[in-house]
Image (cartoon, coloured by chain):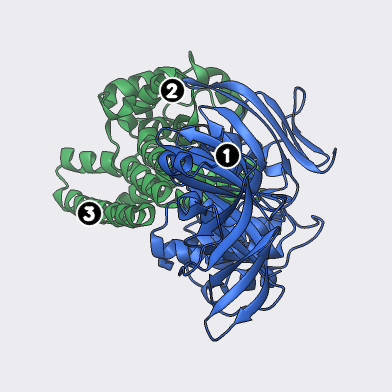
Amino acid sequence: MTQDLWSPIWLTIQLAGVTTLALLIIGIPIAWWLAWTPSRWREVIATIVALPLVLPPTVLGFYILVALGPQGLGGWLGPLVGLRTFAFSFEGLVAGSVIASLPFMVQPVRNSFEAMGRRPLEVAATLRASPWDAFWSVALPLALPGILTGAVLAFAHTVGEFGVILMVGGNIPGETKVLSIAIYDFVETLRWREAHILSLGMLVFSFLVIFTVSLLARRSGRRTS
Amino acid sequence: MTGATIDISLDGQLGSFRLNFEAGLPMYGISALFGPSGCGKTSVLRAVAGLNRIPGRIVVGREIWQDEQTFVPTHRRALGYVFQEASLFPHLSVRRNLTYGEARAKGAPGHTQFDEIVELLGIGHLVDRMPDNLSGGERQRVAIGRALLAQPRLLLMDEPLSALDRMAKDEVLPYFEALHANLKIPIILVTHDISEVERLADHVVLMRDGRVLASGPLSAMQVDPSLPLAAGRQAAVTLDAVLDQYDSDYGLATLKVSGGEFLVPMEQAARGSHQRLTIAAGDVSLATQAPQGSTLLNSLPARVLSATIAGNEVIAVLGLGDDGAGSRILSRVTRKSWESLGFREGQLVHAQAKSVALVRRKSR
């Protein structure tokens, strides 16, 4: 029984951790581009990034499934890592979660960059810092509250994701059976005790997440004022 | 003159208006870019820093910062920039703000030391604080120190005092004067405040609607009746003087300028020290003879070099001394007095200054 409980918890933490890490690497450059580009494609890209917020998870999951499957991207990337397809695999879940949680990372980080404005970067340039140097020494530290907010939200959203994961990963124990799906299973098989334990855990976790995010938001508000 | 000037020529469209700027500034002292808000002063300064790209040519000494082929990015230009708001990095302590540029300018020639700058600006007690806990004046002093520690060959200042209230301004101004006296590097100061020009500038570029109206030494620009400086209500002349005597009984100093001397109430200062005076045109009246039985302290012989009629007033440029070869000052009198007393150009007059203000003590 403990195995039944711990396996999905551990898998979920792994999935959310890897997803958050990937989102930090992908999301911060996208947020940077959206904050500063004069391109008229800016709002188009911003809208595409925001789509997962409003699309039904099943629709999102369906497209990701098609993309990851043998006919899509997964069909020719998969063999490189010895898979026939990315669908119904942990790697597939990561890819799906990254797309589903992208707006949660990009939006707060972009807001932080925009609130900071260009001035700190100009100051850094007049103090002989190259753009790359200024990004690391000034922009990232100043946007840190936004980056932390984005990371916490992306992590939490990945933990809570259900529809996309069910579509992309199915329900393979130890491979794709994450928390939200485990709870669903427990209820289906009338194992209410386990469903209660996991649900209560999620409730507490979610409370802590929102609490943390509002603390971070207060802190960044103080700094920019 | 190659190598001895800062040559700036810019010509480009800036939003709705055209900037056409051309001036050569000396490689020493403070040059003020002076003009009303929106005339393009800040755009010029930002272009010199490479923060804005306006077609043209910028040469500082022997270094080309911009021409047809070249555009040196901001971080490779040896400059310091002080913004209107101090813009300190909020995530770094005062010390780390100060050393941010210094650390990146290692190996730059003529190294200005941390301790020297900190002492000059009186910010030693602040170095371990965070920028949030500083007053406006303190922040601006730290910003100046931070710019100087980046080892600039040219210091650019964009209205560095205008975001400060009166008290903070009075707190920061003496440090500007100390910089002026102690540093060898040239400073370009953007301002719309004539009192800052009078107090600080050696050279002035007058700007209007994106163009240069005139450029030259401050004292020459102030006595040119065709320029707004001499024609305005606030017209005044700035004179650099040497303290000749100090009468501690009355608290009066005798300050020598070319062609004459002024008695000025001030705190005691050393004989031979350099002082800067300003005399408003409206405070100088004219008499045909040396006055007698007057409370006015300053009455100097001078010649009328030129007279410009402006409505019901006359603005006269006077040369101090019997031959009129000394320093120039301005006098604004009514046209009625001018005509009824029969004043004319070339005439010897007695210029009576109701008040002479000390604007700056120079430590040199």
Q: Are marks 1 and 2 on the same chain?
A: no
Q: Nearer the viewer, residue B217 or A29?
A: B217
Q: Are marks 3 and 2 on the same chain?
A: yes
Q: Chain of mark 3?
A: A
Q: Which residue is mark 2?
A: A42
Q: Secondary structure at mark 1?
A: loop
Residue found at x 34% / y 50% = A9
Query: Which chain is displayed in green in the rendered image?
Result: A
Q: Secondary structure at mark 3?
A: helix
Q: Which residue is mark 1?
A: B344
Q: Which residue is mark 3?
A: A207
* Image quarter in which the N terminus of chain B is found: top right
Q: Nearer the viewer, residue B108 or B230?
A: B230
Quarter of the rendering containing residue A204: bottom left
Callout in the foreground (1, 3): 1
Q: Position of residue B233 (x, y in %)?
A: 43, 43
User: Badges 3 and 2: C-beta atoms under 8 Å apart?
Assistant: no
Q: Where is B243 relative to B51, above or below?
A: below
Q: Secondary structure at mark 2?
A: helix
In the image, A142: left or right of B155? left
Q: Position of residue A69 (x, y in %)?
A: 45, 19
* Image quarter in which the C terminus of chain B is found: bottom right
